[in-house]
Amino acid sequence: MSVRRELVSSKKVSNISVRLINEQRILQQLYWHGGQTQLTLRNELRLSSPTITQALQAFKETGLVLEGPEVASSGGRKPRLITFNYDAFHSVGVEIRRHHIAVVVTDLRGQVVCERTESLPFENVPAYWRSINRSIHQLVDAAGVRRVLGVGLAFPGELTLDGSAIERAVVLGLRNEPLDNIRQHFDFDVTIENAANTAGFGAVWRAHGLEDAVYLIVTDNGIAGSLIVGSQIFQGTNARRKVGAFGHMVLVPDGKPCFCGGRGCWSAYCALSNLFARSDGDLDQFFRRVREGDPLYQQQWDSYLTYFAQAVGNIRLALDMDIIIGGKIARYLKEYLPLLEEKVVSHPSLQGDSNFLKVDDIEGNSLAIGAALIFVDRLLSGKLPRFPLP
Ligand SMILES: [Zn+2]
């Protein structure tokens, strides 16, 4: 886990930061395991009993951990399980789109407690942001939730590297907008992150145990993506070229025009709109015809998958990471994953490679959920000034 790396790399850690790091380790251990006894915590984290007792006492006071049931003992008094309380706090994620917003309230697991999608055309004016703030209040009230860590905005655009401003959002016609101008309209702590990044962050969070992955979102218009390294969003060095813009890798020199102005990009071949012509934009119908064995549909799907495999192979060769495919296509792609993988590994350099493709078929607002999880991550890492670890 990243905290452990921090521990090793810091040469001059003060006693206070050692204590904080140990507390984070205890909290994260309980979070990912649900519950453990003090003895298991001591053995697995190699910490002293007083350190653990002191941290647990403080976590109990904040409500983050609870006394669980007694468990069997090998002799003597039965130990109690210490359990993580996933309802101690809640988090909010908002997906901002051109014509609507999706708001979710999640528990600390990232499970949705309450959600709402509403029509709200984007307009960078105070009334727009205040309207989102109002919607959050209503949803939080409806969920009966008291302690909200913060609000993560999943945004369709590029942010400055320090996250303090929106560099540009072409789809919303926005440029150089400081986040503070937006924050002032909210009653909550607000952070903003590119929507493909939040989706990738959430997917890797759910696949606990996986720390590095490439995440791809296939939409009607193209393919967006993100790179998650060490369970964190990899930001790169240039805000204008967001990391994970895999959709614009060129597959065919001078090929089909792409919306970016270039030609032959992966997005030009594998935007879902490529599958719409025959089925009027109805993916259910498209895949029904493929399954029924209609040769025209099968041929089109096979050609689509061939381009898809070419791009995925390039990514796998370059990064040697698991690749998670999300977006509207995920639930259809699931049954064709072995076929896609077969096409990918037909490249001589990838022969023998296997099990690196996954689909993110979470139902619902995965972008907003990922944005909400940013605050859960901050809580577990002791990075929330309003909710400091003890
Ligand atoms: Zn392009």
Image: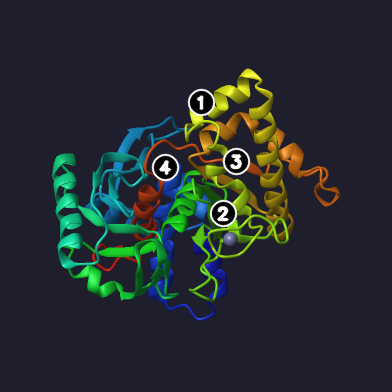
Q: CA distance from mark 3 to mark 2?
A: 14 Å
- Which of the two labelled residues, at mark 4 and mark 1, occupies the earlier sequence position? 4
**What amino acid type is highlighted by mark number 4?**
Thr
Does residue 51 appear in the picture of this structure?
A: yes
The residue identified by callout 4 is: 37
Secondary-structure class at tag 1:
helix
**Mark 3 or 4: the one toward you:** 3
Which image quadrant for residue 258?
Answer: bottom right
Which image quadrant for residue 385?
Answer: bottom left
Which image quadrant for residue 298?
Answer: top right
Q: CA distance from mark 4 to mark 1?
A: 52 Å
The residue identified by callout 2 is: 211
Secondary-structure class at tag 3:
strand
**What amino acid type is highlighted by mark number 3?**
Lys
Left or right of 296 on screen, residue 114: left
- Crowdedness near tag 2: few (<14), some (14–19) or many (≥20) residues, C-alpha within 10 Å: some
Q: CA distance from mark 1 to mark 2?
A: 36 Å
Tell me the quadrant of ligand 1.
Answer: bottom right
Instruction: Identify which residue, 109 or 35, lies in the foreground.
Output: 109
- Crowdedness near tag 1: few (<14), some (14–19) or many (≥20) residues, C-alpha within 10 Å: some
Q: Residue at x 28, y 50 (%)?
A: 101
- Which of the two labelled residues, at mark 3 and mark 2, occupies the earlier sequence position? 2
Q: CA distance from mark 3 to mark 1?
A: 24 Å
Instruction: Identify which residue, 249 or 188, lies in the foreground.
Output: 249
Q: Are marks 3 and 4 in contact (CB under 8 Å)?
A: no
**Mark 1 or 2: the one toward you:** 1
Secondary-structure class at tag 2:
loop
Q: Residue at x 33, y 47 (%)?
A: 108
Q: CA distance from mark 4 to mark 2?
A: 26 Å
- Which of the two labelled residues, at mark 4 and mark 2, occupies the earlier sequence position? 4
In the rendered image, the quadrant that contains the C terminus is bottom left
The residue identified by callout 3 is: 358
